[in-house]
Image (tube, rainbow, N blue to C red):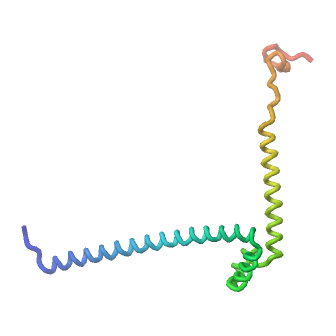
């Protein structure tokens, strides 16, 4: 076995160091993605809980409206939550949602009714209307 020079050993260690740095950067990027996913999931869960609670607690809804009116100042962001910023808009949104839900329930009920109605009886060959030209009974006579 040939002995490596000190310069070759240094070059190998530098290469290993670069590989370790690249691997560390990759792992940190993966960790950041996982943290962002976890944070987004947490926001969705908390948001859903808040949305459910504002339907049952008017005082909480008022407090939330006050907090949002103070905290959400960008018009672009305010535009997506008008029903959470104003009680009148909230009540209108709830009425519209209830109306939509009732219409969807009615449609579903009608679809279920149609699906369960018996099909018209099939005709037997004896009841079938006469065939036209080339049919089993020959040319049709009128």
Task: Depth check: give the residue in front, 91 or 119.
Answer: 91
Farthest right residue in view:
142
Residue at 78% x, 15% y: name it: 136
Would you identify the image quadrant in which residue 14 lies? bottom left
Q: Residue furthest left?
A: 1
Number of marks drawn: 0
Question: Which residue is depicted at the point 8% across and 73% down?
Answer: 3
**Above/below status of 98 relative to 30:** above
Whether residue 9 sits left or right of residue 95 in the image: it is left
Residue 89: percent from the left, percent from the top? 81, 74
The location of residue 60, given as percent across then percent down, is 72, 76
Quarter assignment of residue 30: bottom left
Query: What residue appears at the point 67 percent right and 71 percent down from the top-left corner?
Result: 50
Percent of width and height locating residue 64 = 71, 78
> Image quadrant for the C terminus?
top right
Q: Is residue 140 left or right of residue 29?
A: right
Q: Residue at x 70, y 82 (%)?
A: 67
In this rendering, the answer to whether 131 lies above or below 30 is above
């Amino acid at each position: 076995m040939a002995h490596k020079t000190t310069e070759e050993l240094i070059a190998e260690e530098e290469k290993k160091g670069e590989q370790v740095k690249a691997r560390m950067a990759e792992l940190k990027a993966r960790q950041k993605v996982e943290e962002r996913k976890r944070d987004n999931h947490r926001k969705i869960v908390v948001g859903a809980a808040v949305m459910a609670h504002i339907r049952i607690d008017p005082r909480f809804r008022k407090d939330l409206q006050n907090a949002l009116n103070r905290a959400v100042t960008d018009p672009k962001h305010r535009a997506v939550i008008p029903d959470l910023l104003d009680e009148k808009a909230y009540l209108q949104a709830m009425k519209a949602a209830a109306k939509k839900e009732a219409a969807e329930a009615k449609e579903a009920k009608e679809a279920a009714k149609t699906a369960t109605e018996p099909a018209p009886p099939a005709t037997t060959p004896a009841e079938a209307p006469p065939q036209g030209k080339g049919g089993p009974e020959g040319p049709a006579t009128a």
